[in-house]
Image (cartoon, grey):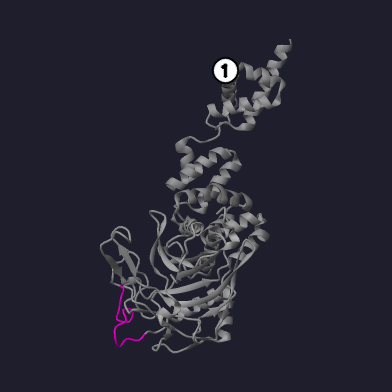
């Protein structure tokens, strides 16, 4: 982005989040637990749009959506309407989606609002409640596949769509916004972002001098960042060659990591929005909003502040821990078992988080429990293992799920505390490194070289305090002998 400044890039997001805590779909009684089920088995005449059927709103879905609007500082409408969004595409069996609209008399659930990321306010344009389309599958890539398969089990699942203003200027900011939004939804207890397809995003991006391009089919936060980075490079190249960037919809190919043109982007009038005739307007009372707000759980920003005050954590530690509800929960469970919260947080945001990122997995996919980590920290305190040995121990725990005491016994990781044994090893190292011994007699810093040799010879198992004492004792003896 050397010739395109961040201020010349505008990024907006349309984020679709399933309400995964619901037992049924948005407008019918079909089970919402469709993952892993046979295709087209969680369907009924209502979600398939058969003639003569009538949708009925899931009241719990509306309550959850109101919670999201409160959490995002939005203005909740006192009267909400559903609209039909008409389009011919195989993922919608009715050829229209029951959604919401904020023009032509349309009233969505909420307008406005914001989320703070890195002290920057990202404005929300609207929040709406709608049904999810079905899921399309291809044999190979979208370009090479000879046919398309559709599974309607997902059609009708309750979705909350959050539409932002184009306030983000970098792909990294877009990813951070999504991480913050997912944390809010998880803390509210209404959506599990770790479930496949539960949180999806369409990203709109424009560079100065070009029209808005929408990127679809982005399945993860990392892919959002990659897709936007690719699109910035592509659009920049076109602008530099004097080629006009037209408004269009593009597909993100995760395998090849490129965007592919799907179609010219539809204008709003192409969807022929009109009020859903089978659903009456819904009145949202202020008392109803207050009652929902009263029952709301602690949100990430509140939890971060509490972590700083209650556990005396550095701001950065508290910020990283509360990005994920599962990670914050894990931390708090550890604090119930071990009285050093800062030590716990350092291990979690260091070795622990690094492992999760490397493997591309979530914390709840691990077999590790708070008891594993706390037992390991206690072994460090007791001097049974060193910090260096603890890092190896943690890796083994993460891989196998075994308790630390079992791994210590199996791998013989205990620190060597036998002074006589240490003395013999020290003697061997000194004999093998005569020049280093001469240097160490007159230069304290040279002792570190001998300590390094000693640790390498014992795979870091010798207690460094005991080793240092014995090395200095022997050097003192050798110095006296040299003088005499």
Q: Is residue 162 above or below residue 223?
A: below
Q: Position of residue 427 (x, y in %)?
A: 59, 19
* Relative to 38, 463 lies left or right: right
Q: Does the stretch in magenta take in 47?
A: yes
- Camera-side residue: 30 or 429? 30
- Camera-side residue: 156 or 22? 156
Range of the magenta residues?
42-54
Q: Residue furthest right?
A: 483
Q: Position of residue 388 (x, y in %)?
A: 56, 38
Q: Residues within 10 Å of mark 1 (few under 14, many from 20)?
A: few
Residue 460 position by quadrant: top right
Q: Residue at x 67, y 20 (%)?
A: 439
Q: Is residue 177 above or below residue 48?
A: above
Q: Does the stretch in magenta take in 338?
A: no
Residue 323 position by quadrant: bottom right
- Camera-side residue: 287 or 379? 287
Residue that badge 1 annotates:
432
Quadrant of the snapshot with the N terminus? bottom right
Q: Residue furthest left?
A: 146
Q: Is residue 474 above or below residue 304?
A: above
Q: Main secondary structure of the magenta part?
A: loop
Residue 98 visible in this rendered orientation of the protein: no
Q: Position of residue 82 (x, y in %)?
A: 44, 84
Residue 211 visible in this rendered orientation of the protein: yes
Q: Is residue 115 above or below residue 223?
A: below
């Amino acid at each position: 982005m050397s010739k395109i400044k961040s201020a010349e890039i505008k990024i907006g997001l349309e984020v679709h989040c399933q309400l995964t805590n619901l037992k049924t779909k948005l407008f019918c009684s079909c089970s919402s637990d469709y993952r892993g089920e046979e295709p087209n088995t969680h369907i009924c005449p209502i979600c398939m749009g058969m003639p003569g059927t009538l949708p009925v709103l899931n009241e719990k879905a509306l309550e959850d959506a109101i919670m999201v609007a409160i959490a995002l500082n939005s203005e909740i409408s006192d009267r909400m309407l559903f609209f039909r969004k008409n389009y011919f595409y195989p993922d919608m069996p009715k050829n229209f989606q029951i959604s919401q609209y904020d023009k032509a008399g349309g009233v969505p659930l909420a307008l406005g609002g914001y989320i703070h990321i890195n002290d920057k306010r990202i404005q929300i344009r609207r929040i709406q409640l709608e049904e999810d389309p079905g899921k399309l599958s291809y044999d190979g890539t979208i370009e090479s596949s000879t046919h398309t398969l559709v599974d309607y089990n997902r059609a009708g699942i309750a979705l909350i769509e959050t539409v932002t203003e184009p306030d983000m200027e970098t792909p990294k900011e877009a990813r951070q916004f999504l991480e913050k939004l997912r944390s809010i939804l998880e803390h509210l207890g209404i959506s599990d972002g770790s479930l496949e397809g539960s949180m999806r995003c369409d990203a709109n991006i424009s560079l100065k001098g070009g029209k808005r391009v929408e990127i679809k089919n982005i399945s993860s936060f990392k892919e959002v960042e990659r897709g936007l980075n690719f699109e910035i490079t592509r659009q920049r190249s076109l602008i530099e060659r004097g080629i006009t960037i037209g408004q269009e919809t593009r597909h993100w190919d995760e395998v090849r990591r490129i965007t592919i043109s799907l179609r010219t982007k539809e204008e709003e009038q192409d969807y022929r929005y009109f009020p859903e005739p089978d659903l009456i307007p819904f009145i949202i009372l202020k008392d109803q909003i207050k009652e929902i707000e009263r029952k709301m759980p602690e949100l990430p920003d509140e939890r971060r502040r509490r972590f700083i005050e209650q556990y005396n954590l550095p701001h950065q530690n508290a910020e990283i821990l509360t990005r994920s509800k599962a990670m914050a929960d894990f931390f708090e469970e550890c604090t119930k078992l071990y009285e050093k919260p800062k030590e716990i947080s350092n291990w979690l945001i260091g070795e622990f988080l690094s492992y999760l990122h490397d493997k591309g997995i979530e914390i709840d996919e691990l077999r590790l429990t708070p008891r594993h980590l706390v037992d390991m920290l206690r072994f460090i305190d007791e001097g049974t293992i060193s910090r260096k040995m603890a890092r190896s121990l943690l890796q083994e725990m993460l891989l196998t799920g075994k308790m630390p005491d079992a791994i210590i016994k199996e791998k013989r990781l205990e620190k060597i505390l036998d002074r006589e044994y240490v003395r013999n090893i020290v003697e061997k190292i000194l004999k093998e490194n005569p020049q280093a011994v001469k240097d160490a007699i007159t230069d304290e810093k040279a002792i570190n070289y001998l300590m390094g040799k000693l640790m390498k010879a014992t795979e870091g198992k010798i207690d460094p305090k005991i080793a240092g004492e014995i090395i200095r004792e022997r050097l003192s003896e050798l110095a006296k002998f040299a003088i005499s």
